[in-house]
Every structure is written in structure tokens, then in C-alpha cells.
């Protein structure tokens, strides 16, 4: 956990994000923190549609960070129906991120109700009122996910939003995603901004079906997954072929305790011994095809 101060960075949609010195990455894409939450997470998970057919919406927000994904979800739901109850588990290992976001008023363009709830969650790690029952579980998500499983939580929507696979491979491994998939309800969706072939393979190995979400900001599409394969936007031929390359070899972390470096080295070794096509070859083929 850090005690550092995060410096707010303005993104192109007018919302603010932070830069992480530890992971050497922005928390969101330059094109917009709020926009990314809406288009990469809330819309693919069909949160609005669920609001019209359910009394309670269950959300698992992995890597809560500043809280944008949760904030946009709450806003979308309560704009349609303020009486809907939301049950939320949020996983995060650095409480300073959400505290600093609140204290720097970065979430001020959300409604008062959303801000009040996020404020309580950041300060008390727990909220319970008529419309929200939420817990912020602090610590390494590889461990805290077990609490969510033990509560038999079956999410309507899971937001998987760690830093990128090369920076934070521990939250993109087959073993971690298998635990995450145990928390996905039978009609639920899991969304992530990543379209990495390694991530998509890990989702498939966890028994999920995958589709592509539309490109916003971070030029490439994201990924949406569910249990039954219904209503998933199809992968393009190019994306399908990407899953046959060495890039699709997933990260592994059998005991859920390895360092990022160790997890990366293990994958690099497996890639160097693989007979699969190199992803550079795959890229070249598709450049030729599209020219
Ligand atoms: C890309 S940011 C998430 C942005 C966030 N979803 C939002 O809307 O603001 C990744 C977050 O993962 C957190 N994180 C990094 N490693 C973690 C771990 N092992 N367990 C839990 N959280 C972790 C970081 O502190 C950071 O807040």
C-alpha cells in the first residue's frame, strides 16, 4: 500500500484520473475516465437492461481505484429506477486511491447520492442503506476474492479493471480468473477493457464464453464474457486467429502468491518453447490483408 499523493490528470472527456508511479501507468485511458467506465464496463454488462427486470443488482468491482466503474453503474441504475437496491463488493489494495479521489473532489460531476455513497465507502469500507449494500475489501484481490466466493455472491456484473497485463499480471492469471468466474451469476456478464489474447484465453479456460466490446479511447476493443454464450458480440476473424498465436499463452500463478516478475518470466519461458505462430507474424498477415 502506498502513502503517496496522486496527481490528478485531466482526460479528454473532462473527467480526471491518476497516474500510478508504482505501475507506471494511468488509471484510465487518455480519452476519458468516465467514458471508459460507461463504454467498456457498464454498457457491455447491460446494467440498464438489468435495471428494468430485477429488484436487486449485484456488482463485483475488481480494482475499485477511484471508483468510476461503481459510480457510473450506480448513476445508470438510479437514473432509471431510484428504488433498485445494489449489492456491491469492491476489491482494492490501496485505500489512498479512493480517499484521494474523494478528497480532491474528482467525482463531483456525479449526483450527490452517488458521491455520498462513495464517500462513505472510501472512509468506512462499508455502506448499508435502503438502496446500497456495499463492502470495500482491502488487500490483494487474489486473497480478498475468497471472501466474495465464501459469501456465495453471484454477480450480475463483474468489472475486471487491473493495470495492464505486463504491469499487473497477477490479476490476469488463469488461476485468479477462475476464482473470479465463480462469482459470476448464470445470467451475469464480466467486462474488461483488455483485448489481450492471454486474457481472453484465461477467461475461456475459466469456462466463460467471450465476445468483443466496441473500441473507445484505447483504440482496441475490450472483452465481454458470460457463462451461457448468449448475446455476446462476435470476435472478428482477426481476433480469433490472435487466439492461436503465442500471445494467447496465458499467465499462470498456481498458488496465487507469485510476484509479477516471476509470473511474467514463467509465461515468457512457455512462449519461447511454443510451436504456436508468433503474434508478429499474425500482425503482418493482417496488415497485408487489409492493405
Ligand atoms: C486501472 S486501476 C483501476 C481503476 C478503477 N477501476 C477506477 O474506475 O478508478 C487499477 C487499480 O488496481 C489496484 N491494484 C493493484 N494491484 C492490486 C491487487 N493485487 N489487488 C487489488 N487491487 C490492486 C490499484 O491500486 C488501482 O487502484
Image: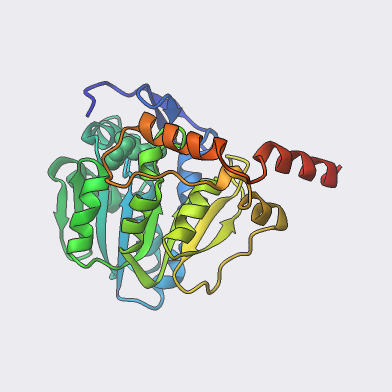
Q: Quadrant of ligand 1?
A: top left
Tell me the quarter of the picture where residue 180 sits. Answer: bottom left
Height in image: 42 above or below 275?
below
> Is 226 placed left or right of 22 in the picture?
right
In the image, residue 80 above or below residue 218: below
| Residue 10 falls left or right of residue 61 | right
Residue 52 sits in quarter? bottom left
Of the pair 28 and 227, the residue shown nearer to us: 227
Residue at 24% x, 41% y is: 140
> Is 14 above or below relative to 112?
above
Quarter of the figure that contains the N terminus: top left
Where is residue 163, by image quadrant?
top left
Residue sitting at the far right: 291
Q: Is residue 193 something that shows in the picture?
A: no
- Residue 68 in percent (x, y) is at 37, 45
Residue 169, x across and y down, in percent: 40, 38
Instruction: Determine whether, in the image, residue 190 is placed left or right of residue 112.
Output: right
Residue at image location 48% in from the left, 47% down from the top: 250
Q: Along the line of sight, which residue is nearer the eye, 201 or 74?
A: 201
Q: Residue at x 24, y 34 (%)?
A: 94
Name the residue: 46% across, 67% down: 226
**Residue 159 seen in this snapshot:** yes
Image quadrant in which the C terminus is located: top right
Q: Position of residue 204 (x, y in %)?
A: 48, 60
Amino acid at each position: 500500500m502506498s502513502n503517496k499523493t496522486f496527481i490528478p490528470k485531466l482526460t479528454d472527456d473532462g473527467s480526471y484520473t491518476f497516474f500510478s508511479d508504482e505501475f507506471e501507468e494511468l488509471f484510465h485511458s487518455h480519452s476519458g475516465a468516465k467514458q471508459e467506465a460507461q463504454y467498456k464496463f457498464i454498457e457491455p454488462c447491460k446494467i440498464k437492461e438489468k435495471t428494468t427486470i430485477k429488484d436487486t443488482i449485484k456488482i463485483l468491482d475488481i480494482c475499485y481505484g477511484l471508483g468510476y466503474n461503481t459510480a457510473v453503474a450506480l448513476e445508470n441504475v438510479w437514473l432509471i429506477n431510484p428504488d433498485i437496491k445494489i449489492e456491491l463488493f469492491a476489491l482494492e489494495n490501496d485505500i489512498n486511491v479512493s480517499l484521494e479521489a474523494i478528497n480532491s473532489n474528482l467525482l463531483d460531476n456525479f449526483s450527490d447520492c452517488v458521491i455520498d455513497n462513495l464517500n462513505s465507502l472510501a472512509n468506512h469500507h462499508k455502506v448499508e442503506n435502503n438502496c446500497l449494500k456495499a463492502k470495500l475489501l482491502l488487500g490483494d484481490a487474489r486473497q480478498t476474492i475468497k471472501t466474495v466466493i465464501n459469501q456465495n455472491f453471484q454477480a450480475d456484473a463483474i468489472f475486471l479493471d487491473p493495470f495492464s497485463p505486463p504491469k499487473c499480471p497477477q490479476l490476469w492469471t488463469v488461476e485468479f480468473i477462475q476464482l473470479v468466474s465463480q462469482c459470476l451469476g448464470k445470467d451475469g456478464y464480466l467486462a474488461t477493457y483488455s483485448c489481450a489474447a492471454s486474457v481472453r484465453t484465461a477467461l475461456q479456460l475459466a469456462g466463460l464464453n467471450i465476445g468483443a466490446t466496441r473500441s473507445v479511447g484505447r483504440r482496441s476493443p475490450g472483452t465481454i464474457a458470460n457463462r451461457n454464450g448468449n448475446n455476446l458480440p462476435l470476435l472478428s476473424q482477426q481476433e480469433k486467429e490472435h487466439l492461436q498465436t503465442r500471445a494467447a499463452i496465458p499467465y499462470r500463478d498456481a498458488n496465487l502468491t507469485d510476484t509479477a516478475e516471476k509470473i511474467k518470466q514463467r509465461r515468457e519461458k512457455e512462449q519461447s518453447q511454443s510451436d504456436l505462430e508468433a503474434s508478429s507474424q499474425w500482425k503482418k498477415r493482417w496488415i497485408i490483408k487489409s492493405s
